[in-house]
Structure formats: C-alpha cells, structure tokens
C-alpha cells in the first residue's frame, strides 16, 4: 500500500481510493437499483400492445443506456440515457412529457429516477457499496 509523507499526499491517496470506489462499487450499486426501479415503475405498470419493449437489448434497463459520469468533486452521476433520435426516453418516461402517443401511460410520469433516489436514501446501499470499495482497496473503514 502506498504511503503518504504529508497530509496533502494522504488526502490525494484517499481521494484516489474514494474516486475508484465511486466509479466501481457505488456506480454498480446505483445502476442495479435503478434497473429494479425501471422494472417496477415502468415495465410492470402495463404491457404495451402497440410496440415491443427493448428491455436489455437497447431499452431503459440495458447497461449501455445507464451511463455513469466521471466523478467530479466526489460526486458520481448516473443517468438513464436511452435515446430515440435526439429524445431522451428516460426523461420522457420520468416526467411523462415529450411524446404524444395514444396509449394508457402517455403523459403520465413514471418516476424511476426519483424512486431510485428514495431507495438509496432509505437503505443507504450506496454507503455500503462505498465501504465495500474502500475495504477492497485495503482501507479499514468503520461506518457509524
């Protein structure tokens, strides 16, 4: 394990480990919870009759459409980015605005992002993932 010869070096080492944990363990945790919420809030509420859902093959729960943005200032951003041309389908589904199709849930929000954040607040799963990531990197971290 690297050593630090000053508080500045120690801070740099800790930030590197924190960033790595956010990018790996926390990102995966948030991605999985968001996929659960997409299933519950979007896919489970009705079965489409006009179109076929893409699901894991280009749909909202496809890992390629759940983007993690680099950590800036110890903040990780996770975004559902399933595009239909230039339209962000995730945003349309979340807000209920952006499409004018004639089907049961047109114009009705299905707030999977909001529900993901709520689940994280209620369970602290992201803190557990962060702890796991820091421990994986050799830090003995105690959560209180």
Image: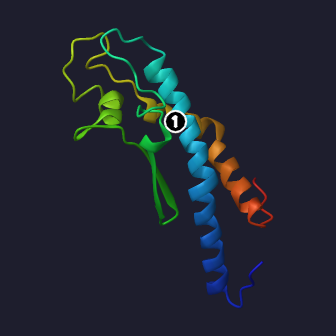
- Residue beneath the point at 22% across and 30% down: 98
Q: Is residue 87 left or right of residue 20?
A: left
Q: Position of residue 58 (x, y in %)?
A: 41, 34
**Residue at 48% in and 28% down:** 38
Rendered image quadrant of residue 107: top left
Residue at the farthest front position? 57
Q: Residues within 10 Å of mark 1 (few under 14, many from 20)?
A: many
**How is colour applied across the structure in the image?**
rainbow
The outermost residue toward the bottom is 5
Q: Position of residue 94 (x, y in %)?
A: 36, 30
Which quarter of the rendering shows the N terminus? bottom right
In this rendering, is residue 25 above or below 134? above
Question: In this rendering, would 14 be left or right of 62?
Answer: right
Q: How many marks?
A: 1
Q: Residue at x 30, y 10 (%)?
A: 104
Considering the numbered disc 1 on the image, is that residue within a helix, a strand or a loop? helix
Q: Is residue 129 left or right of residue 77?
A: right
As drawn, 77 above or below 30: below
Quarter of the rendering containing residue 105: top left
| Residue 119: image location, x then y, percent | 57, 34
Please report the residue visible at 62 percent of the width from the left and 47 percent of the height from the top. Answer: 126
Q: Which residue is mark 1?
A: 34
Q: Position of residue 140 (x, y in %)?
A: 81, 64
**Residue projecting furthest to the left:** 100
């Amino acid at each position: 394990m690297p050593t630090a010869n000053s508080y500045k070096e120690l801070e740099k080492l800790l930030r590197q480990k924190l960033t790595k944990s956010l990018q790996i363990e926390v990102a995966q945790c948030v991605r999985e919870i968001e996929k659960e919420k997409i299933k519950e809030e979007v896919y489970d509420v009705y079965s489409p009759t006009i179109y076929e859902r893409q699901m894991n093959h280009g749909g909202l729960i496809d890992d390629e459409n759940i983007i993690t943005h680099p950590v800036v200032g110890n903040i990780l951003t996770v975004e559902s980015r399933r595009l239909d041309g230039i339209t962000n389908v995730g945003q349309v589904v979340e807000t209920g605005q952006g499409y004018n199709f004639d089907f049961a849930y047109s114009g009705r929000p299905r707030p999977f992002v909001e529900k993901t954040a709520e689940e994280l607040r209620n369970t602290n799963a992201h803190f557990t993932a962060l702890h796991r990531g820091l421990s994986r990197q050799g830090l003995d971290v105690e959560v209180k």
